[in-house]
Image (cartoon, rainbow, N blue to C red):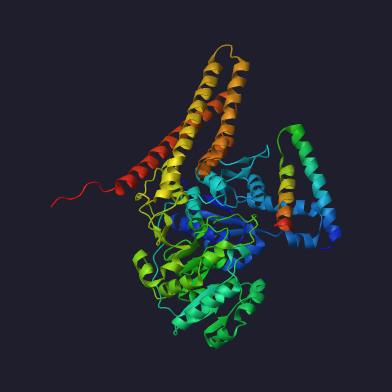
Amino acid sequence: MPNEELTNLITDIEQMVNTAGEQFQSDSNLNDESLTTLLIASLIEEEFNG
Amino acid sequence: MANIENKTFCLIQITRFGDLIQTLQVAKALKAQRPDIRLVLVARDQFASPLSFLLEKTFDRIYKFDVKTELKKECSYKHLNTYFSKFVEEISEEKIDVSINFSFSKSSNYLHSLIESKYKLGPTQNRQNQIDIFDPWSSLVQSMVMRGPFNPFNIVDIYKKVIGVTPEATKKFELKKKDKITIHPFASHHKKSWPVKKWKEVIIKVLRANTDIEINLVGAPNEVEACKDLLNDPVIDHFKKRINNHVGKTNFEQLFNILKESSHFIGHDSMTGHLAKLAQLPTLTISLGTVRPAETTPYGHYSYSIAPKTKCFPCFPNEKCETLQCHADISYQATSQFINMFINNEEINAKTIKEQINVFHLNGLEILGSEYTNANLFQMKSLTEESVGPKSVMRTLLRILFLYKFSEIEENVAFPKINNETYNVIYGCLEGIQHLYELSEFGKKYSKDILIELAKDNPSLDLIKKLSAKIDEIDNLQALVLQPYPLLTPFVEYFQLAKGNLKGSNLVELSESNYVLFNDYSILTSTLHDLITKILSEHKLKNKPVTGQAKD
């Protein structure tokens, strides 16, 4: 997988994790969309960092 | 009794091959007891697909995901989001009654939270982004498994307890006459695996001593180079005709068939050992580095483990180690002598081991053998040690206490035989246990005071805050107790995890839960104190110096 694509993916995920954080701040509860974001972020972390 | 017929259970196991095989062993036990339960599995495609020939016999449906393949299709967050949303939706359509997370990883916790189910066992990541674990056996995994040397239970028994499978010993299989011995001389981490030169010595010695056997070498494609190194030896060359090299040449089904046609299996802690046990083979595991024999030795009859007596064993994967002393502490001479006993299906006990293995080679290692207790739970028992060390005493006590606390099961356990050194160490722990007991009594008092205050018409918020702060202080003080008494770590960590998962949605409910937890902890620590005192008394009684002389 080209490094550039991966960097873009990680930037997107970081942005979505921030959005999930904002959603959590305003609702005091994570919704399904935010939980899915955190699932993807943790899977990517496991996939590439072991 | 509630009707649980035709229910759907979903097991989440998204970690590696070995964990998946252990999960399969639990699923098979559940299906044997409750064939009416529909069983679904959620796993990573890269681990589940190679094992599908086994998994599909037990699971009614397997949901697999594959991050890398999806990224190859389209490397974007949007694509992954659509993929996982659909994946979760599809699983949730199963109308799952009970979902059980056996993976204990952050990603599996999120996945578990997203999957719709009536009851959840094992960890979930709650809507406040905190880990929730409400069943006691999963709490034990979270606080003890792979966190130190103290977990006394095999992971398969813990998983069975999480689900509620009634403990039953696996069926005894017939031992085959030695014929083809399968060896997997590699492992996923260099800490868990001997250097090739040591395996060379073992293989040569075993082939020399047993002229009627062949050896199957097995391994993954990434182990081909190491295998070449192993076979690249003039002495090994002499035995070439009796060594069948399958390394990197088989898929999992072919590997399983090789194991089924073998008489014995020898290797390190790896997936192949668990597969060998499924193929009903006696197994010998050379346990090194991060391996905890009590926890991960292949589950079943005729499982043996050779473990080093190195002080730092078992260690953690992230700890750097230059010397690998535990590798040196297991001599290849003792190993090959034990293998001779093992493959000849000889009676293996302390006496026969001492008769056949040079005591100087036995010095740095311990040989353990599997057995099922009167409660039908698996355990690894030392076959070489007359007395046990402090960690082993703690494991025994944890097993007694947690089995009774969680399941009201009492096993017949003999007094651990200790030496004077262990006596002094565990005697020293009594003071630490006393501190923990006193702290929990204070915790009970403060929780009770909060409840009394809350019951008043005009409760003082200031007082409640002060009392809450005192309860928080107890957590810190418990951690301080561990500094001089590290043997008490599992008791404190289990308590702190339970405290982080208190049930209750308001101050009254939380204070009640706090009180109950501190009360439990008081009982646990006082019982621990009693048990240790009894072990110490027994030791003193047995080692009483002889006074006076017999008269004629």
- The reply to whether residue B135 is in sight is no
Does B454 appear above or below B55?
above
* Tally of numbered discs: 0
Front residue (pair B171, B363): B363
Front residue (pair B304, B47): B304
Does B18 appear above or below B215?
above
- Describe residue B213's horizontal placement relative to residue B247 as left or right: left
Q: Residue furthest right?
A: A4
x and y percentages locating residue B112 in the rendered image: 63, 47
Rendered image quadrant of residue B530: top left
Rendered image quadrant of residue B188: bottom right
Q: Residue furthest left?
A: B552
x and y percentages locating residue A38 in the rendered image: 73, 46
- Describe residue B222's horizontal placement relative to residue B26 as left or right: right
x and y percentages locating residue B384 in the rendered image: 40, 62
Front residue (pair B172, B140): B140
x and y percentages locating residue B414 in the rendered image: 34, 51
Q: Residue furthest top?
A: B457
Q: What residue do we see at 73% from left, 53% from top?
A: A45
Front residue (pair B543, B306): B543
- The reply to whether residue A9 is in sight is yes
| Quarter of the image with the N terminus of chain B in it | top left
